[in-house]
Image: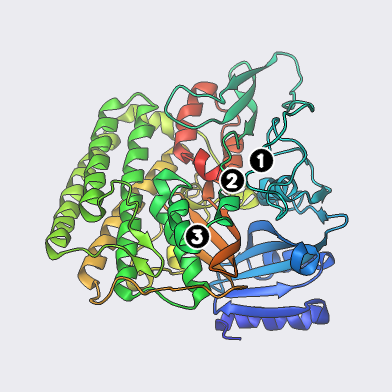
Amino acid sequence: MNLLPDLRIVLDELTERFGARIEHAHAPQPNELYLHTKLELVGALCSAFYKKYQGRLAGVFAEDARAERDVFFVYYLYALDAAHGFVFVRVPVSSDNPELPSLTNAIHAVNWQEREIQDLFGIKLLGHPNPRRCVLHDDWPEVCPLRKDFDLHTKLPPFTGARHRFREVEGEGVFQVPVGPVHAGTIEPGHFLFSVAGEPVLYLQLRMFYVHKGIEKLFESLPIPHCVRLAESISGDSSFAHATAFCHAIERAAEVEAPPRARALRTLCLELERLYNHAADIGAICTDVAFVTAHMHAMRLKEAVLRVNELLTGNRLLRGMPCLGGVRFDFEDDQMRAVAKFVDDFEKEFKDLVELIRSHSGTRDRLETTGVLKPEVTRNLGIVGIAGRASGFDHDLRRDFPHAFYDQVRFSVPIFTEGDVQRRMVVRREELFQSLGIIRQVLEKLPAGPIQIKIEEVPSDRVALGYVEGWRGEIFHWIHTAPGNRLARCKVKDPSLQNWPALSEAILGNIIPDFPVVNKSFNLSYSGTDR
């Protein structure tokens, strides 16, 4: 196996400790290790990854392998930042009586993901503190949509069972305030139920998945080349990041690498996507504390980025640019000069916006100590991206697991420990400055050469992980290929799925009028969650 040296050490130590209980190990990529074992070893391996290797459980998902092996497979994805590698622990689950011991009591980060497995595959969770439905809502009968024998075009009968009931918080003077699922803005549905005593929030219950799109099932119905457009539709403001993560997975499965120029152009586009979203979020946070002047300046900056996107790719959201093996469009010299000028102009105007916000004491008063997410809670919930870095989690896939052209550029990762709205905004501010620097370096170092390598057909029965540090946080696309240039399984992990539970913690002790700005400081994607 061609493993990274640090990951090889991990494998050797685990093999020495657990012996034949690790039945098989293989590494399709130097930083991607698979361990095949039994359910009874899951807890011990989890403990080893957390305590000895400072790893974290970045994902849990299932696959229906009954046709080939008469079992379901459950995969536990561990990210070992220090070893710069990913480890998948694969365990079989009986198809006759599918049951899975839950890890949620020990690692709250997998709560929704385990319940998703139960809903979509019908694998019963043992010992889960809240095994109620999560993804499938009240109008779904007792079916398992991600099982292979469930037809994508099935017309479901009307639901006749019991309706979902939120948990009640009892006590003198406690009352509940529902917000949603339909909201006043042009956003997607999500239900927030506050329990309050007077003004402070005692408890917040979330319910998502109102418009679940069945993206993972749709991936199985399309030829691989057609799946790129589907990946773009997972979350509109992260179209390029999701499509690039998918292409990265396919390229790894096909054992090809996009040309250097293509990887550089991908990096440039990823940073443009980060720019316009961070600028918009900074403005929206200011709006939620009534500093509308700053919001309008930020929206003007966002518009400037969107126009550059359109100049380069023909689409304001960079859609149509990603493709298997590279990118669709090359940039001409005059376009590069326009980008260089844009970066200089944007930086000057953004500095003016930063000074405007700093000069407004009322904004700082509203943002500091509001919506605090403590570092220990961040670790327990597995919070990633902006929210994680504002609460002490020093992690960024661009630095820790370099992809695209990130190993050729220099940048720093802003980390804070206060975990309030102010720091989540400052993380965006500092990342925005770093993005401008990355774009400049890409323009300076842009390699010559082709922008795409042809991938005719991906071999079947290949597994691969594609990953990107999107502007919200880490994005994963795991694929298992099937004959005929199709997919047997595609697992999508958007950072919003991981981060929504943080909102319930950050709002505690705050007042309901502060919820909009706390929520906006996370700015999670309903669509990415309801993929």
Q: Is residue 426 visible to the viewer in this orientation of the structure?
A: yes
Quick one: label 3, few (<14), some, or many (20+) residues within 10 Å?
A: many
Query: Which residue is nearer to you in this view: 422 or 78?
Result: 78
Q: CA distance from mark 1 to mark 3?
A: 28 Å
Residue appearing at x 58%, y 40% in the figure: 212
Residue appearing at x 59%, y 73% in the figure: 460
Residue appearing at x 32%, y 75% in the figure: 260
Q: CA distance from mark 2 to mark 3?
A: 30 Å
Quick one: label 1, few (<14), some, or many (20+) residues within 10 Å?
A: many
Position of 115 with respect to 3 (left or right) is: right
Relative to 301, say whether 121 is above or below.
below
Quarter of image, res 504: top right
Marker count (numbered):
3
Q: Earlier in the sequence, mark 2 or mark 1?
A: 1
Where does residue 528 sit, x and y in percent of width and height? 51, 45
Which of the labelled discs sits on residue 135, or is there none? Answer: 1
Position of 37 with respect to 466 (left or right) is: right
Amino acid type at mark 2: Gly
Q: Earlier in the sequence, mark 2 or mark 3?
A: 2
* Number of the front mark, 2 or 3: 2
Q: CA distance from mark 2 to mark 1?
A: 10 Å
Which of the labelled discs sits on residue 395, or is there none? Answer: 3
Where does residue 285 sit, x and y in percent of width and height? 38, 33
Position of 28 with respect to 449 (left or right) is: right
Q: Is residue 469 visible to the viewer in this orientation of the structure?
A: no
Q: Which residue is mark 2?
A: 214
Where does residue 72 sit, x and y in percent of width and height? 76, 61
* Number of the front mark, 1 or 3: 1
Query: Which residue is nearer to you in this view: 256 or 277?
Result: 256
Q: Check contact, mark 2 vs mark 3: CB within 8 A.
A: no
Q: Residue furthest top?
A: 173
Amino acid type at mark 3: His
